[in-house]
Amino acid sequence: MMPNKYSSKFHGHNVASFSLSRRSLILSALFLCIIAAFIFFRPFQGNRCLNSNPRSVKVVWEHSAAAAVTGSHDQVSNHRHKVMGFVGIQTGFGSVGRRQSLRNTWFPSDHQSLQRLEEATGLAFRFVIGKTSEQSKMSALKKEVAEYDDFILLDIQEEYSKLPYKTLAFFKAAYALFDAEFYVKADDDIYLRPDRLSLLLAKERSHTQTYIGCMKKGPVFTDPKLKWYEPLSHLLGKEYFLHAYGPIYALSADVVSSLVVLRNDSFRMFSNEDVTIGAWMLAMNVKHENNLELCASDCTATSIAVWDIPKCSGLCNPEKKMLELHQKESCSQSPTLESDDD
């Protein structure tokens, strides 16, 4: 087990570094009001006893102004679980095999191992999934939740066309449940080294609004409806802007706190989730931090996330490839070296 970077990092911080700016206080106050108005949490009870920090949680976004925070998590806004980073593994109803492959590799399948990973890295991990009208799939998911208890379930339709909406709902839910320095969105078809991700997030940074990812330049005009973006093309040099590849990226707490206080219809949603987030980050003028170790094509002593770029948007044939990679010493057991790639 690697040293507890999270504990040493926080014990060594100057207390003043945790003081909130006036802007953050205002955002936090707005957020608490909003969450009290339209969120409630209900833990799924299965055949295993849930501990004092339930892992699988259903998040329902109420539209009624009279809705209130209820259930065993009624103090969630005041008692968010403290971690350095929260990693939400985005998954779907057709990804049962992928989740099993992850649980057989870098994502522990039992509470004790998951707890040890959190203590060692300062990172918490959960699968994130929406809902479907197909009762058979919902019933199968409920059984999986009861068995593994490692989900956050969002009250949003699980559809590819709605990925930008799911992503925003994920960041809102993650912020409500976890008090983290960074919130990481990751797909269920990448091979991840949690220890190295922890080292990346633990680095000292002068910018509080940070967007970390393997950056690329993508076309602005991916959709005919994007005509509103045309005036920016002159500022951008061409019809391109920098944004992170979708399989994994991280947003700092200040960035996410700005997202959660906005209405769901406040931002333009594009057809691609990574382009959507990239456009929002451009509008918010955040610090872009490019790290190529988040899109490594093979395991090295510094690779953080491995996937088959550019051939696939994750690992090609992920269920099989995930297991094959984990058997390689260079993937699962190689020593961690600091990377200078910023």
Image (cartoon, helix red, strand yellow):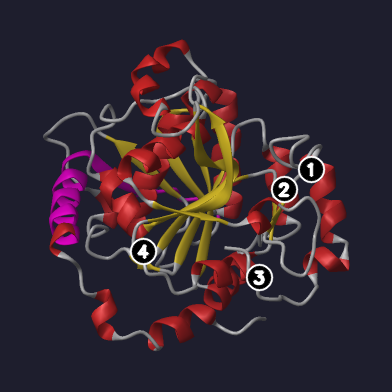
Q: Mark on residue 319?
A: 1
Residue shown at 54%/20% (left/top)? 134
- Image quadrant assignment for residue 330: bottom right
Mark pair 2, 3: CA separation: 30 Å
Task: Determine which quarter of the picture holds residue 339.
Answer: bottom right
Q: Is residue 197 magenta?
A: no
Left/right placement of residue 267 relative to residue 308 reads left
Q: Is residue 283 left or right of residue 290?
A: left
Is residue 256 at least partly visible in the picture?
yes
Q: Residues within 10 Å of mark 2 (few under 14, many from 20)?
A: few
Residue 113 is drawn in which quadrant? bottom right
Which of marks 2 and 4 precedes in the sequence? 2
Q: Nearer the viewer, residue 211 or 186?
A: 211
Whether the residues at callouts 2 and 3 have beta carbons within 8 Å, the answer is: no
Q: 262 or 144: which is nearer to us?
A: 262
Callout 3 amino acid: Ser
- Residue linked to disc 2: 100
Amino acid carrying label 1: it is Glu
Q: How many marks?
A: 4
- The residue drawn where x is 70% and y is 61% is 106
The span picked out in magenta is 24-47
- Name which of mark 2 and mark 1 comes first in the sequence: 2
Q: Could you tell me which secondary element the residue under label 2 belongs to?
A: helix
